[in-house]
């Protein structure tokens, strides 16, 4: 059986933590930042974990991460 290919778009957006969870960056921090408060922009800088409902399909397209 041939090797599975990693979806490169997903590999660039997700990292696996030591416990096996998927870490992702938050959205809404690219443009139209003038109307967003400093608190909201500061919280958008922090990474967060991917939702549990998305983990199983994400691990299927990221077999070696």
Image (cartoon, rainbow, N blue to C red):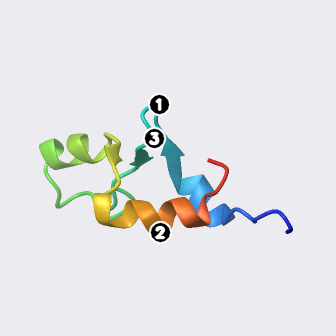
Task: Name the residue located 35 percent from the left edge and 54 percent from the top edge.
Answer: 50
Residue 20 badge? 3
Residue pointed to by mark 1: 18
Picture quarter with the N terminus: bottom right
19, above or below 14, in the image: above
- Element class at badge 2: helix
Residue 8 position within the rendered picture, expressed as x and y whole percent measured from the top left: 68, 62
Residue 28 visible in the current orientation: no
Residue that sits furthest to the right in the current view: 2
Q: CA distance from mark 1 to mark 2?
A: 19 Å
Q: Are marks 3 and 1 in contact (CB under 8 Å)?
A: yes
Residue 46 position within the rendered picture, expressed as x and y whole percent measured from the top left: 31, 39
61, above or below 22, in the image: below
Q: Which quadrant of the structure image shows residue 20?
A: top left
Residue that sits furthest to the front in the current view: 1
User: Which numbered disc flags the more N-terminal residue, 1 or 2?
Assistant: 1
Residue that sits furthest to the top in the current view: 18
Q: Nearer the viewer, residue 2 or 42?
A: 2
- Element class at badge 3: loop
Task: Name the residue located 61 percent from the left edge and 55 percent from the top edge.
Answer: 11
- Element class at badge 1: loop
34, above or below 16, in the image: below
Residue 57 badge? 2
Q: Nearer the viewer, residue 10 or 44?
A: 10
Q: Are marks 2 and 3 in contact (CB under 8 Å)?
A: no
Q: Are marks 1 and 2 in contact (CB under 8 Å)?
A: no
Local packing at callout 1 (Cα closer than 10 Å; few below 14, some 14-19, many 20+) is few
């Amino acid at each position: 059986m041939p090797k599975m290919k990693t979806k490169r778009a997903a590999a660039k957006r997700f990292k696996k933590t030591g416990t096996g969870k998927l870490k992702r960056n938050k959205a809404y921090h690219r443009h139209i930042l003038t109307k967003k408060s400093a608190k909201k922009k500061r919280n958008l800088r922090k990474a967060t974990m991917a939702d549990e409902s998305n983990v199983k399909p994400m691990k299927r397209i990221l077999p070696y991460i």
